[in-house]
């Protein structure tokens, strides 16, 4: 089984590409969604977040994501603590998920694959890129936020120029070009890689 990391900056369309891959029959593990589920339910994560940030970090509905985001954006130390707490548990969850799949290729969709160094754990990476203005428009429409808010979030991620040299495959998602045929070409290359 080949494990391929699927990533791209905010608004690049990586989740859209993940959906197409699923329709083509390839299993996709959504790291960000699993991370959210684990932060709501995993007792060790809960215990350590409460110890560091106080009881108000959780509500009756689960993790207070707005409050946690404030801590993370305010302090690099807090951000690293949260990443080092959650990422190993997400990786363990991914390994278990892989053991249940029967496909020759599986994808792990994750926003910060290169930033965390997690890309090294895969057989290859598929980086989805899109023009900056298009990415900003997509996120503004999707999240109902301002251009400034999108740019602020983008600052927490590496640029495409930083990611491209590390990527095994780069997929251009400009909103106008065909998607399925180039994706099939990438899948053929993945199938043929040693």
Image (cartoon, rainbow, N blue to C red):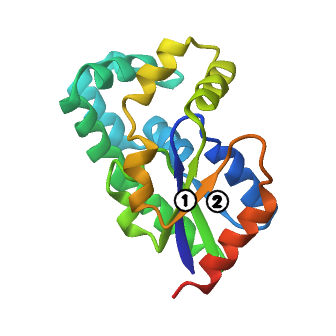
Q: Position of residue 46 (x, y in %)?
A: 35, 35
The residue under the point 71% across, 71% down is 185
Residue indicated by mark 2: 28
Mark 2 neighbour class, 10 Å CA radius: few under 14, some 14 to 19, many 20 or more: many
The residue under the point 77% across, 49% down is 177
Q: Are marks 1 and 2 in contact (CB under 8 Å)?
A: yes
Lower position in the chain sequence, tag 1 or tag 2: 2
Pick the residue in front: 73 or 17: 17
* 161 to 191, vertically: above or below: above
Is residue 93 among what the camera can see? yes
The residue under the point 38% across, 68% down is 121
* 62 to 115, vertically: above or below: above
Q: What is the quadrant of the N terminus in the image?
A: bottom right
**Does dot 1 land on a helix, a strand or a loop?**
strand
Residue indicated by mark 1: 108
Instruction: Write down the quadrant of residue 70 in the picture.
Output: top left
**Does dot 2 land on a helix, a strand or a loop?**
strand
Q: Along the horizontal axis of the image, is 77 left or right of 59? A: left
Task: Using the numbered discs, state the Cα–Cα distance from disc 1 to disc 2 in whole angstroms.
Answer: 6 Å
Instruction: Write down the quadrant of residue 26 in the picture.
Output: bottom right
Pick the residue in front: 135 or 123: 135
User: Disc number at residue 43?
Assistant: none
Q: Along the horizontal axis of the image, is 49 left or right of 35? A: left
Q: Position of residue 69 (x, y in %)?
A: 38, 22
């Amino acid at each position: 089984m080949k494990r391929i990391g699927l990533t791209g900056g905010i608004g690049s369309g990586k989740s859209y590409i993940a959906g197409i891959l699923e329709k083509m029959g390839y299993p996709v593990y959504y790291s960000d969604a699993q991370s959210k589920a684990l932060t709501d339910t995993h007792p060790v994560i809960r215990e350590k977040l409460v110890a560091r940030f106080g009881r108000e970090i959780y509500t009756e509905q689960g993790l207070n994501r707005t409050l946690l985001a404030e801590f993370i954006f305010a302090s690099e130390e807090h951000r690293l603590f949260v990443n080092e707490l959650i990422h190993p548990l997400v990786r363990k969850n991914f390994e278990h998920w892989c053991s249940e799949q029967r496909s020759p290729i599986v994808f792990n969709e994750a926003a910060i694959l290169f930033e965390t160094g997690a890309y090294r754990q895969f057989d290859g990476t598929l980086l989805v890129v899109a023009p900056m203005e298009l990415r900003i428009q997509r996120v503004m429409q999707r999240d109902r936020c301002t251009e400034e808010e999108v740019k602020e979030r983008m600052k927490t991620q590496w640029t495409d120029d930083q990611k491209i040299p590390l990527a095994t495959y780069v997929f251009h998602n400009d909103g106008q070009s065909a998607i399925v045929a180039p994706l099939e070409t990438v899948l053929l290359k993945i199938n043929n890689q040693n």
